[in-house]
Image (spheres, helix red, strand yellow):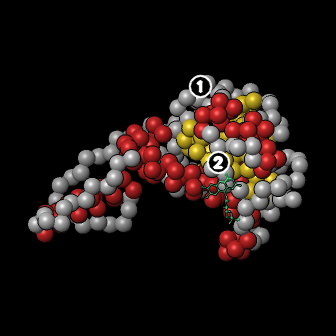
């Protein structure tokens, strides 16, 4: 990963100010950040991102489902949710309803600004490099944010295979829903080059936290899992070669 290059302290003050102005302007172009001083030179425009929002060709859906529209009002405050969230690793057996799954997925990656396609979790340059895969006792699904839909990809229960790739963690095997957050780095690399590697991990954190907070608000529980072998998870799920699992979030009714 490249480190940020800083101008040497020995540069004349006028040069340092010019460099700072160019850097601020780049931030505004890239992120739509707060107003910056007028740049002395126009920075190069970032390349447009290739934003793919559908399942990769190799994962052909067997069936598709519309998810129920998400609730926009909860029964507990954000502060109460923050104060009570705790990792849960033991779950009651059973499945979640489509409405429960839809609510969790909306919090993770749902489109909250249909006009611009912006989602519930922030994304560097709105490049949205993540795909969410869902393992349940009834099969493996893929979440499609546009249209708030699920695609059924596999009718097998793959939770045990996923748990095996995650150091045999029982919470992964026993969860009613394992959310696999997988990245498609090319989407963010198209705009940010090497810095994409950093952004992808930050974004996975946003998504996982949204899932855990929404689960807590719904009376469910879950845990973020980072201990797994990337390649084994990719193989167990049959993920396309350009996608990499970054984070697992087992969820369910806590025991
Ligand atoms: C990056 C990351 C990776 C983690 N990986 C695992 C894991 O593989 N297995 C697990 O049981 N918990 C995992 N956790 C959960 C932590 O153990 C947990 O958050 C911590 O003990 C604090 O407890 P709390 O979540 O209840 O506040 C992970 C947490 C983070 C942030």
On whether ligand 1 comes within 8 Å of the CB at mark 2, the answer is yes
The image shows residue 72 at horizontal and vertical percentages of 70, 62
The disc, 2 or 1, on the residue closer to the chain's N-terminal end is: 1
Task: Find numbered disc 1 in the image and state the secondary structure of the residue it sits on.
Answer: loop
Of the pair 69 and 252, the residue shown nearer to us: 252
At a point 29% along the width and 66% down the height, the residue shown is 36
On whether ligand 1 comes within 8 Å of the CB at mark 1, the answer is no
Q: Residue furthest right?
A: 93
Whether residue 7 sits left or right of residue 91 in the image: it is left
* Residue 168, picture quadrant: top right
* Residue 26, picture quadrant: bottom left
In the displayed structure, 144 sits above or below 73; it is above
Instruction: Classify the position of ligand 1 by quadrant: top left, top right, bottom left or bottom right.
Output: bottom right
Whether residue 33 sits left or right of residue 86 in the image: it is left
Give the crowd class for mark 2: few <14, some 14-19, many >=20 residues within 10 Å: few
Of the pair 190 and 69, the residue shown nearer to us: 190
- The reply to whether residue 57 is in sight is yes
The residue that label 2 is drawn on is 227
At a point 65% along the width and 30% down the height, the residue shown is 235
Task: Find out whether the residues at labels 2 and 1 contact each other: C-beta distance under 8 Å.
Answer: no
């Amino acid at each position: 990963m490249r480190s940020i290059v800083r101008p040497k302290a020995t540069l004349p003050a006028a040069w340092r100010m010019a460099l700072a102005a160019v850097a601020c302007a780049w931030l505004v172009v890239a992120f739509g950040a707060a107003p910056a001083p007028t740049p002395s030179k126009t920075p190069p425009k970032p390349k447009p991102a290739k934003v793919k929002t559908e399942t990769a060709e190799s994962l052909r859906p067997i069936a598709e489902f519309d998810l129920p529209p998400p609730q926009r009002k909860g029964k507990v405050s954000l502060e109460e949710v923050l104060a009570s969230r705790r990792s849960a690793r033991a779950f009651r057996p059973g499945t979640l309803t489509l409405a429960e799954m839809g609510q969790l997925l909306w919090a993770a990656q749902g489109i909250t600004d249909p006009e611009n396609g912006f989602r519930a979790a922030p994304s560097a340059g709105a490049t949205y490099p993540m795909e969410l895969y869902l393992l349940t006792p009834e099969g493996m699904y893929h979440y499609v944010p546009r249209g708030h839909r699920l695609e059924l990809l596999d009718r097998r229960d793959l939770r045990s295979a996923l748990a095996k790739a995650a150091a045999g963690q029982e919470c992964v095997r026993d969860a009613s829903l394992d959310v696999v957050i997988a990245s498609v780095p090319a989407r963010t690399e198209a705009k940010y080059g090497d810095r994409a590697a950093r952004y992808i991990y930050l974004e996975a954190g946003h998504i996982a936290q949204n899932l855990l907070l929404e689960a807590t608000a719904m009376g469910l529980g879950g845990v973020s899992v980072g201990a797994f072998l990337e390649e084994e998870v990719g193989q167990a799920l049959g993920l396309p070669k350009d996608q990499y699992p970054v984070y697992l979030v087992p969820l369910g009714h806590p025991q």
